[in-house]
């Protein structure tokens, strides 16, 4: 069975590498930090589970500070192997196993190890100032003893939960992942005061069997059975068995008291460990490792289901975003052309424009192209400038509104998705941590590419400047419009008309005016057509850049086609994972 479990873990490790999130370098930039960190947690936890397969059955004592874990450890081993007067701030891991030859090894945080006399260790981890400083360099104390009665068990005494140092609390939870059985030590004095249910649930969600020990019952005036009944009512669903005892009285009472009430209660606990755990160590370990593997596989499935939903949301949001852009592009183009028509119609009625052309054409026999263009530009430039400003305002506004809406959409989605993944994990008894809660960016953390996070207040101004403002030709048609010159065909028409005017000086004034108006309309129509083409080309380019902004910012440059392929790859991976687990 052990070989089969090892092979399963190896095959599972190999299968994990087929995930698009791990295999494709750009994908991690497209998913939330919450999902990404859960993906990495599966990998790191699986390594710990694999390392645990070949070890002796590990039993970890967990509980709050001063619950009596070290005292219970000493009672189980049969002599004072672990100090009971250590300060919480200097707590280290004590690992006690059986061996015919006694030994004590200090494993330091830098990886070095040192064999020492056991009494020497007791002084090193004492409460003196010098000892406190030295203890900070110690990671683990490894003790082998022939006194150890439970030969198949490796006992670990962990730092406390809900302690004054968060580091110790985190260390304890990390140790729990690599253990096979948890003995949860509860201080009988605090049983009705401390809410331990949440911590018990978090360890149970790791797939670890838990036995509870209500310690220090000698310090309270309560019937042990009532204490057990109370704890069972609050946390019994997560506990395999509950005992009430006094480890201190078992150690301190003399041999004459060996048949006392406290010894009887303690023997019930050790008998359970001996019959249910020690004698069935291999089975217990097998079940523990298997439960841990199944919990990791479920986490992998749930996280990838979340990533599938995230990818679908990106695709759906892109379709909506692009449709909105197309509507805005058509609306802006229509508005600009209407404004242009209005202004050019006013120009055709402009008497000063008409008069200037009359004077120039009447005073010259051969009109010069550049002089005609100069006249046209004097009247065309204000129109061009006004349309250019209107264009810039309209394009900027469209980008800000659409970018802001898509970001707010992703914010709402991220909140719902985080809650969904949390509920899915908890429904399968898997511990959940909200990795995104520490994110202080304006855009939650839904795959916003570094350096492209938009400005405060939900506006897209910073993004506009970074994405579109970097290239003036993208956000303005000013450069194109300023280069508009009177087409040669129009100049030719104007010149021909001028020759006609010169030859027709004896004709009536109204005929002359008609010719001037004809030329003005030809000049205006030519400029309008040129301007319309530039508006259309400019808008196409600007709105294409807005689409590119979405792809670059939220999809790591992955096109819609690439995203659809990724979605299919993710779905195939999850389907394969379902099949893998069934086999």
Image (cartoon, helix red, strand yellow):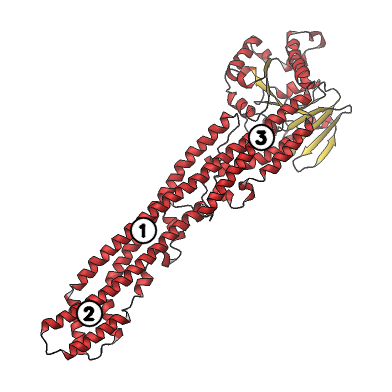
Q: Give SS at disc 3.
A: helix
Left or right: 124 as drawn, with respect to 531: right
Residue designated by label 3: 581
Query: Horizontal and vertical percent for residue 560?
Result: 50, 53
Q: Up-down: is 212 above or below 142?
A: above
Left or right: 176 as drawn, with respect to 328: right
Q: Quadrant of residue 524?
A: bottom left
Q: Give SS at disc 2.
A: helix
- Which residue is found at the position 66% from the left and 34% from the top? 581
Residue designated by label 1: 329
Q: Are marks 2 and 1 in contact (CB under 8 Å)?
A: no
Chain-order first, disc 2 or disc 1? 1
Which residue is at the front of the view, 179 or 403? Answer: 403
Q: Which mark is residue 488?
A: none
Mark 2–mark 1 Cα distance, whole angstroms, equals: 33 Å
Query: Horizontal and vertical percent for residue 216?
Result: 68, 16
Residue designated by label 2: 519
Q: Quadrant of residue 186?
A: top right
């Amino acid at each position: 069975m052990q070989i089969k479990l090892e092979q399963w873990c190896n095959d599972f490790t190999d299968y994990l590498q087929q995930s698009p999130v791990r295999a494709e370098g750009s994908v991690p930039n497209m998913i939330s930090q919450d999902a990404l960190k859960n993906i990495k947690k599966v990998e790191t936890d699986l390594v710990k589970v694999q390392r645990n397969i070949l070890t002796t059955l590990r039993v970890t004592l967990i509980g709050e500070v001063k619950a009596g874990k070290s005292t219970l450890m000493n009672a189980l081993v049969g002599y004072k192997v672990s100090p009971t007067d250590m300060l919480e701030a200097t707590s280290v891991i004590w690992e006690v196993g059986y061996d015919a030859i006694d030994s004590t090894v200090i494993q330091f945080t830098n990886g070095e190890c040192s064999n020492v006399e056991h009494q020497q260790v007791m002084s090193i981890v004492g409460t003196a100032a010098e000892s406190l400083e030295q203890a900070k360099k110690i990671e683990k104390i490894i003790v082998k003893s022939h006194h150890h009665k439970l030969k198949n068990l490796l006992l670990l005494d962990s730092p406390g939960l809900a302690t004054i140092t968060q580091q110790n609390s985190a260390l304890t939870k990390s140790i729990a992942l690599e253990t096979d059985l948890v003995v949860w030590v509860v201080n009988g004095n605090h049983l009705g005061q401390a809410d331990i249910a949440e911590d018990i649930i978090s360890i149970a969600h790791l797939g670890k069997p838990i036995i509870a020990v209500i310690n220090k019952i000698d310090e309270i005036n309560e019937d042990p059975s009532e204490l057990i009944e109370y704890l069972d009512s609050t946390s019994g669903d997560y506990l395999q068995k509950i005992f009430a005892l006094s480890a201190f009285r078992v150690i301190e009472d003399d041999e004459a008291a060996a048949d006392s009430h406290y010894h009887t209660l303690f023997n019930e606990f050790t008998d359970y460990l001996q019959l249910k755990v020690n004698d069935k160590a291999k089975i217990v370990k097998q079940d523990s490792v298997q439960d841990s593997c199944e919990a990791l596989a479920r986490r992998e499935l749930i996280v990838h289901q979340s990533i599938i939903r995230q990818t679908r949301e990106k695709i759906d949001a892109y379709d909506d975003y692009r449709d909105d852009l197309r509507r805005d592009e058509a609306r802006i183009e229509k508005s600009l052309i209407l404004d242009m028509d209005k202004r050019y119609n006013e120009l055709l009625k402009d008497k000063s424009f008409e008069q200037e052309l009359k004077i120039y054409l009447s005073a010259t026999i051969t009109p010069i192209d550049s002089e005609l263009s100069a006249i046209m530009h004097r009247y065309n430039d204000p129109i061009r400038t006004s349309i250019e400003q209107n264009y810039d305002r309209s394009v900027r506004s469209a980008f800000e509104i659409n970018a802001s809406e898509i970001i707010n959409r992703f914010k709402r989605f991220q909140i719902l998705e985080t809650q969904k993944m949390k509920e899915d994990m908890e429904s399968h008894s898997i511990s959940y941590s909200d990795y995104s809660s520490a994110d202080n960016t304006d855009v939650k953390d839904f795959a916003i590419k570094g350096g492209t996070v938009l400005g405060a207040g939900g506006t897209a101004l910073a993004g506009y400047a970074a994405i579109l403002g970097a290239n003036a030709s993208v956000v303005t048609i000013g450069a194109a419009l300023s280069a508009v010159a009177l087409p040669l065909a129009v100049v030719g028409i104007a010149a021909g008309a001028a020759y006609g005017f010169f030859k027709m000086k004896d004709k009536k004034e109204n005929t002359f005016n008609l010719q001037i108006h004809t030329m003005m309309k030809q000049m205006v129509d030519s400029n309008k057509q040129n301007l319309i083409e530039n508006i259309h080309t400019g808008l196409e380019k600007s709105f294409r850049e807005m689409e590119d902004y979405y792809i670059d910012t939220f999809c790591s440059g992955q096109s819609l086609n690439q995203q659809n392929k990724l979605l299919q790859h993710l779905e195939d991976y999850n389907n394969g994972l379902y099949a893998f687990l069934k086999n």
